Amino acid sequence: MTHRDYPRTPRLDLIETIHGREVADPYRWLEDAASDETIAWSKAQNELFEAERTTWTTHHHWSERVAQLLGGGMVSVPSWRGDRQFFMRRMPGEEMASLFTIDPDGVEHLLINPVALDPSGTTTLDSWQPSKEGNLLAYQLSVGGSEEASLYIMDVATGKNIDGPIDRARYSPVAW
């Protein structure tokens, strides 16, 4: 294995008092993703990784095996609310899971398919929670890979959104 030099990572002498305790935060400068220093450091880290990756001899084998294992699809554990069953399902070959419901009459309905919403694959269903009665669904979507979720409320019977988007809901858990 070749020795590689890691990018220099400066440590700040930053100490804050939070709730009466001193907390060191020597790498706070990395939180500014747009700074020239962070961009240069990230570029150097990527170059280090790429140099190391070129030495991997079993990468192709493991990549194929993971694809085989993930290619089988999945069905989540159901959540029952009122007379409805809610669950996620990803069919073999699909990139992302979709949210479904089975109504009291036994008919299955697709509620949210992230790929149908955005064929580029950069919209994700981050979180969802049906109301206790099962008639409403609160869910969060992140668009364009931003991870800045927006909150929506759906009428489950019609599949129509009745509220939203409510922006910047990423760190807000979905609950009724």
Image: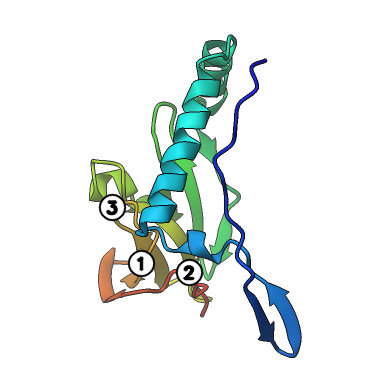
Dot 2: element: strand
Find the distance from the CA under tag 2 to the CA under tag 3. Answer: 25 Å
The residue lying toward the viewer, choosing from 56 and 99, is: 56
Dot 3: element: loop
Type of amino acid at the residue the image marks with label 2: Pro
The residue lying toward the viewer, choosing from 169 and 152, is: 169
- In the image, what residue occupies the spot 57% across and 50% down? 9
The disc placed on residue 130 is: 2
Q: Which residue is mark 3?
A: 144
The N terminus - image quarter: top right
Q: What x and y, as percent, mark residue 6?
A: 59, 36
Proximity of marks 3 and 1: CB atoms separated by less than 8 Å: no
Q: Is residue 97 visible?
A: no
Proximity of marks 2 and 1: CB atoms separated by less than 8 Å: yes
- In the image, what residue occupies the spot 49% across and 72% down? 171
Q: Which residue is mark 1?
A: 156
In the rendered structure, the answer to whether residue 2 lies left or right of residue 96 reads right
Type of amino acid at the residue the image marks with label 1: Val
Q: How many circles with numbers are drawn on the protein?
A: 3
- In the image, what residue occupies the spot 48% across and 69% down? 130
In the rendered structure, the answer to whether residue 88 lies left or right of residue 140 reads right
Image quadrant where residue 119 sits: top left
Type of amino acid at the residue the image marks with label 3: Gly
Is the residue 112 above or below the residue 59 in the image? below
Find the distance from the CA under tag 2 to the CA under tag 1. Answer: 9 Å
Is the residue 1 above or below the residue 34 in the image? above
